[in-house]
Image (tube, rainbow, N blue to C red):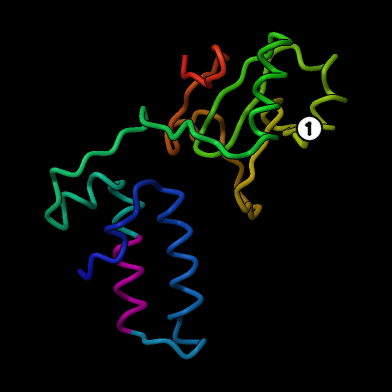
């Protein structure tokens, strides 16, 4: 075990690092087969046991992660303006990883949500917004699966601060 993902603090950073490492080290692209096998083994361990299980396996059981500790410091004015708009119109805003999921009575607000850059997810019947790079996968995850993987916080807007409810 080479502890390749030891610096990753969440599953999104694990996935992003994995994609980067595959592009650099895949044997079909001139990379090292042994290193690629090690990368795959650690990535599979994280998929199977989660980050806490991975940290325990590599001997860092004191390392703690929590889906309750979601970074609430966003630089994006768009992100913040979406949250402010939703709070002022009574819509429900949920932060899952780096994605905003918007629900409630959104029908009257759909044009404004589109203007803000939100997209409609028909299979979840919710609006969403993210600034993270996103690649569509063949499988469709339920909101419960997304919440379990990335954590979830419903947001409310307080005096000049975004607060987790």
Look at the image and tell me in which quarter the N terminus lies: bottom left
Q: How many marks?
A: 1
Residue 71 lies, in percent from the top left, at: 44, 35
In the displayed structure, does residue 130 sit left or right of residue 146? right
Residue 132 lies, in percent from the top left, at: 60, 48
The residue at the point 64 percent across, 55 percent down is 135
Q: Nearer the viewer, residue 149 or 123?
A: 149
Quick one: SS at disc 1? loop
Most extreme residue toward the bottom is 30
In the displayed structure, does residue 67 sit left or right of residue 130? left
Q: Nearer the viewer, residue 98 or 80?
A: 80
Report whether residue 83 is seen. yes
Say if the magenta span includes residue 37: yes
The residue at the point 49 percent across, 66 percent down is 19
In the displayed structure, does residue 152 sit left or right of residue 90? left
The residue singled out by tag 1 in the image is: 116
Relative to residue 122, is residue 136 depicted above or below?
Answer: below
Relative to residue 145, is residue 26 depicted above or below?
Answer: below
Residue 154 lies, in percent from the top left, at: 52, 19
Residue neighbourhood size for the residue with mark 1, other residues' Cα within 10 Å, grouped as few (<14), some (14–19), many (≥20) = some
The residue at the point 77 percent across, 17 percent down is 106
Report whether residue 137 is seen. no
Relative to residue 93, is residue 30 depicted above or below?
Answer: below
In the displayed structure, does residue 113 sit left or right of residue 145? right
What residue span does the magenta drawing correspond to? 34-43
The residue at the point 36 percent across, 31 percent down is 69
Say if the magenta span includes residue 76: no
């Amino acid at each position: 075990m080479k502890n390749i993902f030891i610096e990753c603090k969440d599953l999104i950073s694990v996935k992003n690092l994995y994609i980067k490492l595959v592009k650099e080290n895949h044997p079909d692209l001139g990379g090292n087969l042994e290193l690629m096998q090690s990368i795959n083994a650690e990535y599979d361990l994280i998929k199977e046991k989660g980050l806490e299980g991975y940290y325990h396996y590599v001997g860092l059981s004191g390392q703690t992660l929590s889906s309750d500790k979601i970074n609430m410091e966003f630089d994006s004015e768009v992100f913040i303006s979406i949250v402010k708009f939703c709070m002022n119109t009574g819509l429900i805003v949920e932060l899952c990883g780096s994605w905003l999921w918007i629900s409630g009575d959104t029908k009257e607000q759909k044009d404004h949500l589109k203007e803000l850059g939100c997209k409609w997810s028909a299979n979840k019947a919710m609006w969403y917004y993210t600034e993270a790079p996103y690649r569509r996968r063949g499988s469709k995850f339920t909101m419960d699966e997304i919440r379990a993987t990335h954590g979830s916080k419903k947001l409310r807007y307080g005096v000049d601060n975004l607060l987790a409810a």
